[in-house]
Image (cartoon, grey):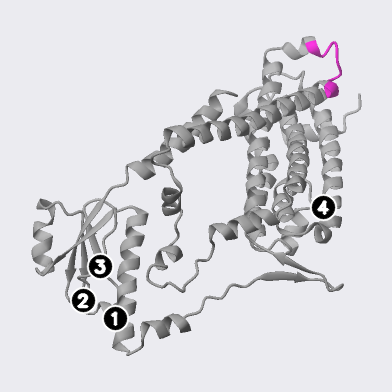
Amino acid sequence: MTILGPVLMAALFIVAIWMSVAIEEKQKILIVDEVQLFHDLPSSTNVQFEYSTQHIDTIKKQFHNTDFTGILYLPFNVLNSNTVMLFFKNQPGVMAMKYIENKVEGKIEILKLMENKIAQITYEKIKTNINISTISFKKQGKEENRNQEAGFVGFFFAVLIYMFIFLYGMQVMRGVMEEKTNRIVEVIISSVKPFQLMLGKIIGVAMVGLTQFLLWIILTFSITSVAQTFILKDKFDVEQVSKMNMSSEILKQAQSPNQQPEMTSSDIMEVLMRINFPYMLGMFLFYFLGGYLLYSALFAAIGAAVDAESDTQQFMLPVTLPLIFAFIVAQMTIQNPEGPVAVWFSIIPLTSPIIMMVRIASVPFDVIMWQLILSMLLLIIGFVAATWFAGKIYRTGILMYGKKVTYKELWKWLFYKG
């Protein structure tokens, strides 16, 4: 899977792009205009407009016997209702819908300007789009630009940590259960202490997982780059990518030259340039391993306590719930990275590997420094404490067979002296 995984992921990515670019259905739209003012809507490569003077009911009866893919119906009151109807045989794609919507919207806008005797050039001068630049102003007089979009970079790293903990934590649990049910552990335990065996499994899987994860990233990126250069060179170009990623604001640019899109490629590059990636990658590696070590110790304890995977359900929820909750809070943290919820959950060890990665990308180091140091220390302490408690359960549970374990019994194992 180390080799096959990246091939499958890259293939999925390539096929998705190829299908979206090469198999885009062309739309042939028949305009039925009761206002008789929309006959000049411009066609595009994928959307072709034709005009009809027949009544809508007549057109609808003949529709399925024609090669038109849709009927664009503009009623008499369209200038007041701002509502048009599109009858279709097959649901048009998002880009086709956006193109039709923006062309009709632009035309209605022009007609309303004419109706109110407002020159379009005057309207364009008056029409304003505000871009609020967020600047953190410190008591010392220091100013620093903030950009909320940087939180999405941190969220991406947080998702990787979330996936890694679940994927390889479960692997640790299943490995412990396999050794226990196959009685392999009875041989191994004669040579090493249970606690050493548990730590060896956790660290061993971590190193294998980290190596595999890095290989996946490198190989997926390499395969995708080669495919983009050679296989999709005729279809996957800059123009197509810009069309695929185009938002409705950019589409409206054709109707309103002075209107600026909310986020351009240069804005995205500016956001990325502001992020200190060596610092981000260093913190990612720490929380990546810290979160895994904390949770894998708990997963190892669950694996040692039960005989079958079906018995793990009652113990899995308390372990996985903080992780799932952290993933939900991380999405809120993007919007408010310095709020009390974000601050506290970025410090608590069970949620900090996810939440802190979002905050690291959004909040400058000098602001977050003491919270970051505290979070890292508590995560280390949390891992040591979780390993100690898990070791207690592991020591007793690893040699226990054929008995359904309860929470009451686990509590006794934690404080058993022997």
**Label 4 sits on what residue type?**
Leu
Label 1 sits on a secondary structure element that is helix
Label 2 sits on a secondary structure element that is loop
Residue at position x 29%, y 58% from top? 44
Q: Where does residue 40 sit, x and y in percent of width and height? A: 22, 70
Residue 46 placement, left or right of 36:
right
Label 1 sits on residue: 111
Label 3 sits on a secondary structure element that is loop
Near-viewer residue (395 or 10)? 10
**Label 2, label 4: how many angstroms apart (C-alpha)?**
62 Å
Location of the N terminus by quadrant is top right
Label 3 sits on residue: 41
**Label 2 sits on what residue type?**
Leu
Label 2 sits on residue: 37
Residue at position x 30%, y 76% from top? 108
Q: Are marks 1 and 2 in contact (CB under 8 Å)?
A: yes
Q: Quadrant of residue 177?
A: top right
Circle 1 or circle 4, nearest the eye: 1
**Label 1, label 2: how many angstroms apart (C-alpha)?**
9 Å
- Mark 1 or mark 4, which has the lower sequence index? 1
Mark 3, residues whose alpha carbon is within 10 Å: few (<14), some, or many (≥20)? some
**Label 1 sits on what residue type?**
Leu
- Mark 2 or mark 4, which has the lower sequence index? 2
On screen, residue 375 above or below 100: above
Residue at position x 40%, y 82% from top? 121
Location of the C terminus by quadrant is top right
Label 4 sits on a secondary structure element that is helix
**Label 1, label 4: how many angstroms apart (C-alpha)?**
57 Å
Q: Is residue 195 magenta?
A: yes
